Image (tube, grey):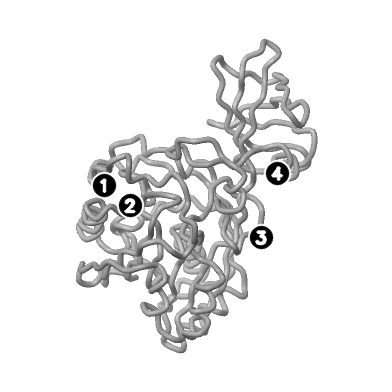
């Protein structure tokens, strides 16, 4: 398939620039992956779309204040964006400056001197005045996505973070989780819907466009994840009782399907299983992929020609998803990180 197979026209005014006053007040477009039918609902209707015994799986990653501005000895400005904390005071970062950056460069920042150590592919290893997560949380700012055309304000530190956030390491929020508040959780509890957690630290590469026309040539950025024993046990209990596994966000879908593929590599039997896994993933989910774990997906609307849109198309069918997106544009849904959401069930042909 080609990158342009996932194009759609989006008016810029539909890109949400601010969060709603209430997290759970978003609209919800429901897409049936079996029939392609869709309907307009509200996010607060989610308990009615689920059944007692269904399991919601959330990503509990915490967004770091990962963007920091610095100055070269020459006076030139440098933007530093954390990708990953390394051992000690080392970190892997993206850097942007008007002139080339070289190893040995010392950059003055609000938190002290940042020393450039070496280049690593498209990224840089730097030495910080203190461990990376502590340093950036103290001196950095919230790294809002590039399509939000404003500076971060104090409210973003709370709103660009899910209420489940606890494991620091992400530079972008798992945005489907941003819709959940205490009232919605109470309604889900009352409906008999369970929840569990995995961790996938979203990297800045999530905003990088697919630069190759042929999808076979695209290489995904690596992201760290942990699918723990408690999550695997909750998934097995849910399956045995006939409930559905609902991934809250594409990050959760990638984490669960990565763990399932790793399990299959260790245990090549007929049963679709999932066992604990901790490591990196470069899993590129696109049409033709067969889902082993996820039965339904709650997700925001994604960028045209993005790997996240390709994942949703793999899950429910490209034509059905693009038709639903066209409806969302006509119906003036709010798009991207601070926007509205979709609830999507898996197309039968996308099952393993």
* Numbered disc 1: secondary structure: helix
Name the foreground residue: 352 vs 242: 242
Q: Residues within 10 Å of mark 4 (few under 14, many from 20)?
A: some
Residue at image mark 1: 6
Residue at image mark 2: 310
Q: Residues within 10 Å of mark 1 (few under 14, many from 20)?
A: some
Residue 245 in the image, given as x and y percentages of width and height: 44, 75
The disc, 1 or 2, on the residue closer to the chain's N-terminal end is: 1
Residue 188 in the image, given as x and y percentages of width and height: 49, 79
The disc, 4 or 1, on the residue closer to the chain's N-terminal end is: 1
User: Alpha-carbon distance for marks 3 and 4?
Assistant: 14 Å
Q: Nearer the viewer, mark 2 or mark 4?
A: 4
Q: Seen from this angle, which residue lies furthest top?
A: 74
Residue at image mark 3: 166
The disc, 3 or 4, on the residue closer to the chain's N-terminal end is: 4
Residue at image mark 4: 137
The disc, 3 or 1, on the residue closer to the chain's N-terminal end is: 1
Q: Residues within 10 Å of mark 3 (few under 14, many from 20)?
A: some
Residue 306 in the image, given as x and y percentages of width and height: 36, 45
Classify the position of the C terminus by image quarter.
bottom left
Looking at the image, do the residues carrying marks 2 and 4 touch, with CB atoms under 8 Å apart? no
Residue 334 in the image, given as x and y percentages of width and height: 35, 52
Q: Nearer the viewer, mark 4 or mark 1?
A: 4
Looking at the image, do the residues carrying marks 1 and 2 touch, with CB atoms under 8 Å apart? yes
* Numbered disc 2: secondary structure: helix
């Amino acid at each position: 398939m080609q990158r342009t197979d996932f194009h759609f026209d989006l008016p810029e005014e539909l890109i949400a620039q601010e969060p709603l006053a209430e997290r759970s007040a978003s609209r919800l477009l429901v897409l049936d992956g079996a029939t392609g039918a869709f309907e307009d609902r509200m996010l607060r209707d989610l308990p009615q779309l689920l059944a007692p015994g269904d399991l919601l799986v959330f990503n509990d990653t915490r967004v770091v204040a990962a963007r920091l501005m610095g100055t070269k000895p020459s006076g030139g400005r440098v933007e530093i964006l954390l990708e990953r904390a390394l051992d000690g005071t080392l970190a892997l970062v993206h850097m942007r400056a008007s002139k080339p950056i070289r190893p040995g460069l010392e950059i003055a920042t609000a938190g002290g001197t940042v020393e450039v150590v070496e280049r690593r592919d498209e990224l840089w290893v730097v030495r910080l005045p203190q461990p990376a997560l502590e340093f950036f949380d103290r001196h950095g700012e919230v790294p809002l996505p590039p399509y939000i055309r404003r500076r971060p304000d104090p409210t973003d530190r709370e709103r660009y973070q899910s209420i489940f956030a606890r494991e620091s390491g992400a530079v972008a929020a798992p945005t489907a989780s941003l819709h959940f508040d205490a009232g919605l959780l109470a309604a889900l509890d009352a409906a008999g819907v369970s929840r569990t957690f995995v961790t996938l630290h979203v990297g800045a590469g999530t905003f990088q466009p697919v630069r190759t026309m042929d999808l076979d040539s695209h290489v995904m950025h690596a992201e760290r994840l942990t699918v723990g024993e408690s999550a695997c046990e909750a998934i097995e209990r849910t399956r045995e009782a006939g409930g559905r596994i609902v991934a809250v966000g594409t990050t959760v879908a990638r984490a669960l399907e990565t763990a399932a593929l790793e399990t299959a590599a260790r245990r090549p039997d007929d049963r679709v299983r999932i066992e604990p896994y901790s490591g990196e993933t470069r899993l590129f989910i696109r049409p033709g992929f067969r889902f082993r774990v996820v039965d339904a997906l709650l997700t925001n609307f994604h960028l045209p020609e993005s790997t996240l849109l390709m994942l949703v198309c793999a899950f429910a069918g490209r034509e059905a998803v693009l038709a639903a997106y066209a409806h969302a544009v006509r119906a003036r849904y709010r798009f991207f990180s601070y926007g509205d959401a979709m609830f999507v069930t898996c197309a039968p042909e996308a099952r393993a």
